[in-house]
Image: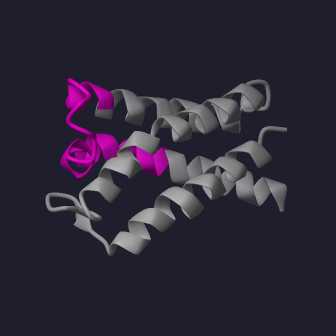
Amino acid sequence: MKQVFRILLIGFFLFAGSYHFINPSFYLDQIPPYFSNSSLINYVAGSLEILLAIGVAIPKTRYWAAIGIVVLLVAFVPTHWYVIEQDGCIPTAYCVPLWLAWARLLVLQPLFIFWAWSVKK
């Protein structure tokens, strides 16, 4: 079962990382305006997601890659907070009910962190 979770994590982050390049506008407006150069942040985040997913696939780098994903997910907290500040609506990306924006931060984000942490060995 652990291998299935690891493969799913790898696939998820390969897709998410690639999507930063396929549809950058989806992410750009989610980056809080107090961060400068949102385009660079978007491409760095996407690149890191791809590299860390590959790292999880390699047994020798799995531990540190999984830790890297945890750190990256923590670094994404300001983005989730910004979506909450916008009442769950980023018009150029998506609009969700405010409760769902909160759930994304308080439920999904910790679950993703736990998921990455659980595949580190």
Direction from residue 75 to residue 78 in the image, left or right:
left
Q: Is residue 37 magenta?
A: yes
Q: Quadrant of residue 45?
A: top left
Q: Nearer the viewer, residue 58 or 76?
A: 76
Residue range (magenta): 14-41
User: Quadrant of the image for the C terminus?
Assistant: top right
Q: Nearer the viewer, residue 62 or 99?
A: 99
Question: What residue is rendered at 22% in x and 42% in y?
Answer: 28
Q: Is residue 16 magenta?
A: yes
Question: What residue is rendered at 20% in x and 24% in y?
Answer: 37
Expressed as whole percent of the image width and height from the top left, the position of residue 68 reads 62, 30
Q: Quadrant of residue 41?
A: top left
User: Quadrant of the image for the N terminus?
Assistant: bottom right
Q: Say above or below: 75 vs 19.
A: above
**Magenta span main SS:** helix
Q: Nearer the viewer, residue 56 or 45?
A: 45
Q: Say above or below: 112 vs 100.
A: above
Q: Nearer the viewer, residue 7 or 26?
A: 26
Question: What residue is rendered at 79% in x and 54% in y?
Answer: 3
Q: Say above or below: 44 vs 114.
A: above
Direction from residue 117 to residue 41 in the image, left or right:
left
Question: What residue is rendered at 54% in x and 38% in y?
Answer: 74
Direction from residue 101 to residue 66 in the image, left or right:
right
Expressed as whole percent of the image width and height from the top left, the position of residue 47 reads 42, 30
Direction from residue 60 to residue 102 in the image, left or right:
left
Q: What is the number of callouts on the image? A: 0
Coloring scheme used: one colour
Expressed as whole percent of the image width and height from the top left, the position of residue 116 reads 68, 45
Expressed as whole percent of the image width and height from the top left, the position of residue 9 reads 63, 51
